[in-house]
Amino acid sequence: MKKVFVLFFALFLSVGTYNTTLLAQNGPDGEDPTAIAGDSSQANTVTTVPDEPTVDEPTVNSEPEVEMSLHQVVKKNFIDGGWEFMAIVLICLILGLAIAIERIITLSLATVNTKKLVAELDNAISNGNIKDAQDICKATPGPTAEVLGQGLKRVDDGIDAVEKAIISNGSVQMGLLEKGLVWLALFIALAPMLGFMGTVIGMIGAFDSIEKAGDIQPSMVAGGIKVALLTTVFGLIVAIILQIFYNYITAKVDSLVNSMEDATISLIDILIDKGNVSTSKVGE
């Protein structure tokens, strides 16, 4: 038993002696003095690299963008789109507007107060003055008065002659009212077609440039597509503008035709009611 105790005590002393030796080597804080010395030597041998002198970059004064007016934007896009097709589209717009303005002025001058005209004719016919009624129609401008005047000229020939004169002259006046609308419709259809043709030709030119370069460059493709699409945009704008005028003119023509028909029916009723038309001559 004593031998075991002595052996255990000796082992304890050897372990304690080993720990004491380690503490003595690592220092009081448990750090390795050789490692600390190595770190301090490396810290002392670190060379500081001097900072490179900074070169002041030149400051670029960005000029403020000048806002372009609508006229300048349209002019720039017109030039960018190519004058070959843009000029043709512009000619369609100018000619179409000229026809539209002429029609609007003509139809405005042809518009009369049909109720007032019919009332004056009724008063003259009631008094038996067919000649005065004809003079009223001659003094009144417009297709309605012209048609009514042609009908009054055939009063002595019977009601059928009056109706035939009104119908035949009414067809002529309708043709005069619709004068120029065919050309206006042509320009409406032609403007976008020219724009589409310019787009197709521009796309062909863009792909031709790509084929010659052998490589697809975004600037090359974007430029060709931009030029191609500008012609379509201008063609559609021209068609939209002319279409608005066309619809307004057709509505004005329809209004005048309806007024003309109402006035002719009223005139025939007045002639029959007042007994100024010989119904016995019907069918002769």
Image (tube, rainbow, N blue to C red):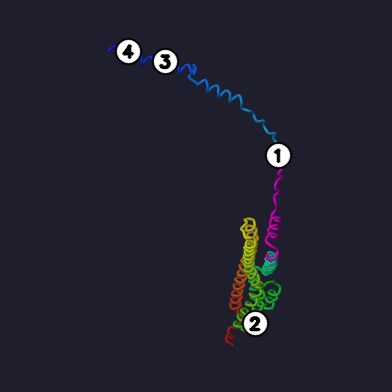
Badge 3 marks a residue whose secondary structure is: helix
Q: How crowded is mark 4: few (under 14 residues within 10 Å), some or many (20 or more)?
A: few
Q: Which amino acid does label 1 sit on?
A: Glu
Q: Give the range drawn in magenta.
A: 60-85
Check disc 4 and report the residue beneath it. 6
User: Which dot, 1 or 4, sits closer to the camera?
Assistant: 4
Q: Earlier in the sequence, mark 2 or mark 1?
A: 1
Q: How crowded is mark 2: few (under 14 residues within 10 Å), some or many (20 or more)?
A: some
Check disc 2 and report the residue beneath it. 154
Check disc 1 and report the residue beneath it. 57
Count up the numbered dots: 4
Q: Which amino acid does label 2 sit on?
A: Arg
Q: Which part of the image, by quadrant, shows the N terminus?
A: top left
User: Separation of disc 1 and disc 4 at Cα?
Assistant: 84 Å
The one nearer the camera, 103 or 220, is 220
Q: Which residue is drawn at 63% across and 28% down?
A: 47
User: Separation of disc 2 and disc 4 at Cα?
Assistant: 161 Å
User: Separation of disc 1 and disc 3 at Cα?
Assistant: 69 Å
The one nearer the camera, 85 or 207, is 207
Answer above or below: position of 128 versus 29.
Answer: below
Badge 1 marks a residue whose secondary structure is: loop
Numbered circle sitting on residue 17: 3
